[in-house]
Image: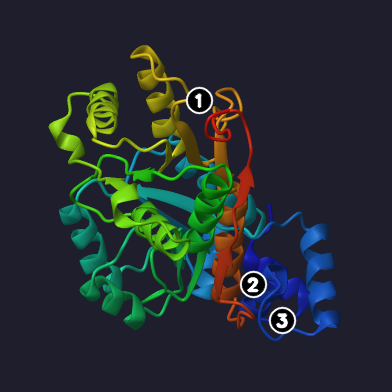
Amino acid sequence: MASLKEVAEQAGVSESTVSRALRGTGRVSAKTRAHVQEVANRLHFTLSRSASSLASGKTMRVTMVFTDTLNTWFNSAALEGAYEVLSEAGYDLVPMIVRTQADMQRFFERLPGNRNLDGMIVVSIMLDNTQVGILEDLTIPSVGLDARAIGGYSATVRVDDADSMHQAVQLLHSLGHERIGFVEMPDNPDFLFSAKLRSGAFMDAAREMGYEEENLALFEGRDSSKFRSFQDAVSETANRIISRPNRPTAICVETDDFAIALIYAMRRVGIRVPEDLAIIGFDDNDRSSMAELTTLHQDPVMMGRMAAEKAVALMHGETLHEPHSMLRTSLIMRSTTCRLGQ
């Protein structure tokens, strides 16, 4: 197969012009670009990723930072969406998992000198002030996917938690529930995730709708490391709900997976869902329809695509019309909610 130098000689241009013409970047006229492509085709030459990277100073690599296993519903779906876009644009997607705050700090400390990526997408993590400052000083774009705030990021894709919780409270209010509550997931003490915004948004929406404090319950997430298993965490939370004086007749749960587990835990002790306790989840994941769970629908595949599209545009030097996108969820009505007393 011919070399880059041979294509340049046959086309009568420099090697850098060949590289720019075949990559579709830089100031190369349409006539020259077509001529170079014709010569390359005739000589059966294909510009390699490494050659392109050396010529452009780019790695054609984007890092996507997660704090949990990649096979969770949200992470795997977001990864799929981002991969579709980045792969089509010619970028490699490199997932990175940071399991502790120390891992996160090391990653950010090394970022300023890291020449092995052209951009990054950070998923569902609240950044501290130091990390925000590092992102602001970077010369590569950073996109926050499911971010708690926009600080430090070149762009973000987020769900409108305030609107989502307003939808949930409005539904429960319309169904006649006077005592309502919100259930948080067990906490990873090393990180503050975007989903934790939901409990505060729920309580704010309930107060705005006229609920008194004595009729509101917040079941805070306990340290996940204190439980032997997910089921232990579910049982402990179910016990707190059941044993609460003036128990709520309806709850909204931080995620669908925890909501579905709570449904089974309640039914095991004779509490009927939805007759005795209405339950709303959040996600609309693959198991939600099977469990007939009323939930708030979000689309992490689409969110991953949007984050990657913003990253690609920024890496190409484009100015985003909407750098920070806020997405609305939709309420999916199923059989875990009903009118009180029905």
Label 3 secondary element:
loop
Q: Which of marks 1 and 3 is in front?
A: 1
Compare marks 2 and 3 and give the one earlier in the sequence: 3
Q: Locate residue 39, reporting x and y percent.
A: 81, 66
The x, y position of residue 48, in whole percent, is 60, 57
Query: Given the image, on which type of amino acid does mark 1 rest?
Result: Glu
Query: Answer yes or no: do the residues labelled 1 and 2 have beta carbons within 8 Å?
Result: no
With 79 as the anchor, is 6 left or right in this view? right
Q: Quadrant of residue 28?
A: bottom right
Query: Could you tell me the amino acid type at mark 2?
Result: Ser
- The relative height of residue 73 versus residue 122 in the rendered view (above or below) is above
Quarter of the C terminus within the rendering: top right
> Mark 3 and mark 2 in contact (Cβ < 8 Å)?
no
Which callout, 1 or 2, points at the residue further toward the start of the chain?
2
Any part of residue 97 in sight: no
Q: In this view, does 134 lie above or below 208?
A: below
- Up-down relation of residue 316 to residue 269 (above or below): below
Choose mark 1 or mark 2, whichever is in front: 1
CA gap between label 1 and label 2 equals 67 Å
Tell me which residue sits at (64%, 38%) in the image: 333
Relative to the observer, which residue lies in front, 155 or 202?
Answer: 202
267 vs 327, nearest the viewer:
267
Which residue lies at the image location 81% right of the left edge and 59% below the top edge? 41
Image height of 188 relative to 51, above or below:
above
> Which residue is labeled 2 in the image?
19
* Number of residues whose C-alpha sits closer than 10 Å to that of mark 1, classed few (under 14), some (14–19) or many (20 or more): some
Q: Is residue 179 left or right of residue 284?
A: left
User: What is the C-alpha distance between the residues marked 2 and 3?
Assistant: 10 Å
Residue 308 falls in image quadrant: bottom right
Q: Name the residue under label 1.
A: 275
**How far apart are the two marked residues, 1 and 3, measured between alpha carbons?**
77 Å
